[in-house]
Amino acid sequence: MPRLKTLVSILFAAFLVLALAAWAIARGCLGVAQDIGEMTFQARPAALDLSRIQSLAHATRSVGADVEKQILFGDLHVHTTYSFDAFMLGLPMYQGEGVHPPADACDFARFCSGLDFWSINDHAEGLTPDQWTMTKDAIRQCNLVGASRDPTVDQDMVSFLGWEWTQIGQTPSDHYGHKNVILRDLEDDRVPRRPIASRRELFPPASGSVPFGPWLRLLLIAAAPGADSRQPYNDLARFLQDRDSVSPCPEGVATRNLPAGCLESATTPTELFERLDDWAFPYLVIPHGNTWGIYTPPGSSWDRQLADHKRPGRREPLIEVFSGHGNIEEYRSWQVRNVAADGSISCPTPTANYLPECWRAGEIIEARCLNANESSEECARRASEARQNHAEAGLPGHLTVPGTETTDWLDAGQCRDCYQPAYNYRPGGSAQYALAITDFSGDKPKRFRFGFIASSDVHTARPGTGYKESNRLQMTDTGLSRFGPPPIAKAAPQPRSLPRPSDGPNTPDFERSASFFGAGGLVAVHAARRTREAIWDSLERREVYGTSGERILLWFDLIETDGADRPMGSQVATMTTPRFRARVAGALEQTPGCPQEVAQMLEPDRLQRLCGGECYSPGDQRRRIDRIEVVRIRPQITPDEDVATLIDDPWKVLPCPDASEGCVVEFDDPDYISGARDTTYYVRAIQEATPTINGDSLRCDRGPDGACRSTAPCYADDRTPAGDDCLALANERAWSSPIFLSYGNERRR
């Protein structure tokens, strides 16, 4: 008996030791906290910048533009692995590259993509106080690398501090979407003490969220085959534990009086603006991804946000119309699903350029039913049931049709006639819709007057990835599509649909989204100098434009009767016929590899890991601009005006002569006076077609009627070879910021 007691005691002690060890491992005791990484403390070679300045000056003179300002290119939407989703992308389970800290982003922007400015925008919902401190330190270091003590000499690259406010609602009524906060200054006494998140919980228990509790972390660590592959999961456990230890800030306390080490949150944009205003530091809030159906509930639109806004022009002066996640510019009048006045939901019928996902769900079920030798009447009934189930399910509608493959859905849910559209397009979130609506609920009508930018939204710390269409798996966010369940976990096909359980997962169809990720866009500013102040002034006055990644040169001006030019972004009151001028020059063609000066500054391994062996390396020849398209929008003047009738896209198409130095076009609008209403104008410069990553998204085989008969998706796994960049011809482009004309007294605002 004593021996048995001794054995039991030993077993109990061993169990206790193992349990404590497991507890310690699950809480990240074997993990390493991520630092800012190793930055290259050398400025970009002056010879490279001088060559670009000279090329820009030559093109500027060729089209007769203002030589007092230069065009600078940047990226104002960049994630490092301080963001939870970016950290996940680097893990072996997602075939990731490992961590990419802020130092990687700094070196990539300076040497790989050769940007003039950039900002860091990790998700505030997961940033710990230590990470926020390190983020500030990293941006300050990056900014100082190329700074000169001589105030007359511009630095090689300007780095901005910021974060992303990441909000996702379950229904259109509680969904606001994602917004980047950009700060002008870097000093501790000139920036908020902490980033402001959209929620108090770091990882909310909402359906569909990943429950990375301690025991799941332990399971991931234990399942790794060896010590080397286990370490990233130990680091993940540490990463998550550091976040778990952050407490929400107390409610009802002014933002300046909150303790530094808590998680501050604002559940609505209005609250976010108010908290930022309380700090009284210069900031910009830039919405993005509003048509991206990976997280945007069907039926979402800008109406609710405009109604809640107090000062939309000041608080949100810019919108990101294009990123590596797609284009959100274009409005379409088709509906993702129909919602009646009583709240009932139904599936809309297809149009020439849109096949609703819910409709395709009915087609899939009907075909399965007929293959099972059921009657045509029964199969038609099941198809109707499937359409209704999918429409009511909303975001995870694909789960109502068990056992589907990506190819089964054809191009359902996608905008067929949009340029590089965001996945599962939500037209009510488009930039055109935002500019066309008016809120009449207050004493004075309110409108959005967005300037247009583009950026990357990259999650691998690679600002400005769009300089070359190569290295798809490294230069795009394709890895995000791996977040869904693997193919082996899919249910078997069934000849009838299933209603989504009320407590079921809210998981979107990640796999299909792989065909919609591309290289990122760029924001361009017209600035007198490459300094923080000059760039910020351009952003505030909306003298900016976006490109799909190519460094297209674009000027767009209102020609006033006094001979002066009012640049893009201007808001002008006039009662005379407006005349406009657009100047444009194509992007410089790229040469292979990296400039010798860059290759000498980065170690070969770092050059390969960060840049993939390819850098921004312009030659002497500019690409041809095919045409200039003019878009005219006449915002609502009564609540019942149909938005679709107010957007003329394109209103005019102006050919660009085949000249390597670009072209200049002018046009006027004789309808402006007779229409007697406010009108907004912007231009798109359309470049000659070139091979583009995912330029044909799902690569449909289309019939004579334009309908998609089959697809060849671009997968994120080995179904598409790693070296296949899924290239297809597409027209890279640039979007000017609009010029806003107010029909009224002759005065400028």
Image: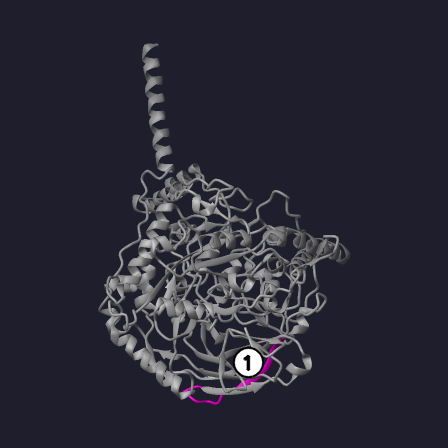
Q: Can you give x and y, in whole percent of width and height, for residue 108 in the image?
A: 33, 64
Q: Where is the N terminus found, in terms of image quarters?
A: top left
The amino acid type of the residue labelled 1 equals: Glu
User: Residue, x 28% and y 64% (percent of image)?
Assistant: 607
User: Residue, x 70% and y 62% (percent of image)?
Assistant: 348
Of 499 and 304, the residue lying toward us: 304
Q: Can you give x and y, in whole percent of width and height, for residue 17 in the image?
A: 33, 27
- What segment is highlighted magenta in the picture? 648-662
Q: Is residue 656 highlighted in magenta?
A: yes
Q: Is residue 62 above or below residue 701?
A: below
180 left or right of 67 in image: right
The answer to whether residue 205 is visible is yes
* Residue position marked by numbered label 1 in the rendering: 629
Q: Can you give x and y, in whole percent of width and height, for residue 555 in the image?
A: 46, 80
Number of numbered discs overlaid on the protein picture: 1
114 left or right of 687 in image: left
User: Residue, x 27% and y 72% (percent of image)?
Assistant: 153
Q: Which of the 4 image quarters holds residue 141?
A: bottom left
Q: Where is the C terminus found, in terms of image quarters?
A: bottom right
| Callout 1: SS | strand
> Tag 1: Cα neighbours inside 10 Å, few (<14), some, or many (≥20)?
some
Of 420 and 160, the residue lying toward us: 160
